[in-house]
Image (cartoon, grey):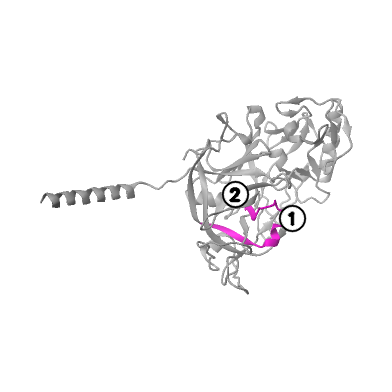
Amino acid sequence: MASSLFISLLLLLIISLSSSSFAQPSFRPKALLLPITKDRTTLQYTTVINQRTPLVPASVVFDLGGRNLWVDCDRDYVSSTYTSPRCRSAVCSRAGSDGCSQCFSTQRPGCNNNTCSGTPDNTVTRTATSGEIATDVVSIQSTNGSNPGRVVQIPDLVFVCGSTFLLQGLASGTVGMAGMGRHNIGLPSQFAAAFSFNRKFAVCLSSGRGVAFFGNGPYVFLPGIPISVTTTPLLINPVSTASAFPSGERSSEYFIGVTAIKIDEKTVPINTTLLRIDGTTGVGGTKISTVNPYTVLETSIYNAFTSAYLREAAGRNITRVASVAPFGACFSTQNVGVTRLGYAVPEIQLVLHSSDVVWRIFGANSMVSVSDDVICLGFVDGGVNARTSVVIGGYQLEDNLIEFDLATNRFGFSSTLLGRRTTCANFNFTSTA
C-alpha cells in the first residue's frame, strides 16, 4: 500500500513538473545583433551569418541596401535543413518571384526542379545573375542593447543561392552578401517577422569591429553610454537601383533628403535639383551605402564642393599638396591640429529636411590619412552621369550610429560618437547568457 502511494505521488510530481515546463513560454528576444568587421584590403564591411545544419559560420559582405541574403551554393553548401520552396508557393510570393525554374544537372542546393528564382546581386562589381530561392536554419545572438544574450534560431530564413563567379571583387573568405535593404526578404524584415519585434535596425561601423542591432534599442556603448539619434524621413526611390531588376520594382536602398551642403556654415553653390529623386527615372537624390568606401558625389557637385573646401582650408593656412588617387584634394598635416573629433579641418554640414536638422561631419570622418604627413578629403568624383547624386559611403559612417525605422520611414543619426567619448568599437561583446 505504502509502495503504491509512493509511486502515485512520484508520478504526480513528474506530471506536475512536466506541465510546469511546458507552460513556460519560449524565449522571445526583443532585439538581435551581428558583429561587423572592416576588411583592410577591400575596405568592405563583413559579418558572419551562422547558417545550415550543422551550423557553418558564413562570412558575408554587409550590404546596407541589398535586397536579401545570398550565398554561394555552387561550392561546399551542405545542409540537412536546406529546402527549396515550390514555385508559386507563399515563400516565393513573399520573395517577389512568380516564375518556375528547372535544374539541368545533378540536383543539389541551388539546383532543383519546380522552384522559384531570385537575383543574387554583387553590388560591389554591379554583377547579378539568377539563383534558386531557398530556406535554411540561421542562428543569431539576441541582445539587451548592452551585451549579447542568448542564441536564438530561425528555422526557415529565406535566402538566394548565388554562383561562385559572383564572389569576384568581394573580401577574401566571404561567400556572399547580407542584404539589409527595404525588401520583404531583406534581413531586417525577416528578423522582425521571426520574433515579432519592430522593423527597425541600427548600424555602427568602425575601422575595426562595429555592430548592427535589429529590433528596439537601447544602443549602449562602453563605458555605459546610451546613444540617441536625430531623425529625418526615409525616402523611397520608385525605381530600383539594383544591378538587375524586374520592371516596376522600387529601390531597396535607403535614401534621405539632403537639401543643402555647407562647409563651415557656408552653403556650397550646387544645382539642388540633383538632390531630388526624379520620380520617373529614379535618378538623383542621396543614399547611404556600405559598399562604397567613401562618399561619392556627382561631378558638378564634387567640383563645387571641392572648390569650396579648398577655399576654407586655405583660410586656415592648410597647405594643399599633390593629389593621391582616388582623392582629388590632399593636404599637408603641417599646420593641422588634432582634436577629439579628428583633424582640425573645416566642418561639413549636410542639411536635411529642415534647416535645424544637420548631419555634421568632422575631421575624423572627412580626412583620410594616406601617409604620415598627408591627409586627403575622403570624397570622390562619381561622374557626370551618376545614377545617384550623393552616395554617403562607409568612411563617413564610421563611429556614427545610424538607425532605420522601416515601419515609420524614419532615418536616425547620432553624428560622431567621438564627441560622446565613445566609438562604435566600444560595444561590449561579452555575453550575459
Residue at which label 2 appears: 48
Q: Is residue 273 left or right of residue 213?
A: right
Instruction: Tell me, yes or no, if residue 230 can be seen here.
Output: no
Question: Which residue is nearer to you in this view: 158 or 141?
Answer: 141
- x then y, percent, for residue 123: 70, 54
Query: As displayed, is residue 249 above or below residue 188?
Result: below
Q: Quadrant of residue 403?
A: top right
The residue shown at (72%, 38%) is: 396
Which badge, 1 or 2, comes first in the chain's sequence?
A: 2
Q: Which residues are magenta?
A: 156-178
Secondary element under disc 2, as helix, strand or loop, is: strand
Name the residue type under label 2.
Answer: Val
The residue shown at (16%, 49%) is: 6
Q: Nearer the viewer, mark 1 or mark 2?
A: 2
Query: As displayed, is residue 369 above or below residue 68?
Result: above
Count of picture labels: 2
**Gap in Å between the C-alphas at discs 1 and 2?**
21 Å
The residue shown at (83%, 29%) is: 333
Residue at which label 1 appears: 125
Q: Residues within 10 Å of mark 2 (few under 14, many from 20)?
A: some
Name the residue type under label 1.
Answer: Thr
- Taking the view exactly as shown, the residue that stands out farthest to the right is 322
- x then y, percent, for residue 332: 85, 31
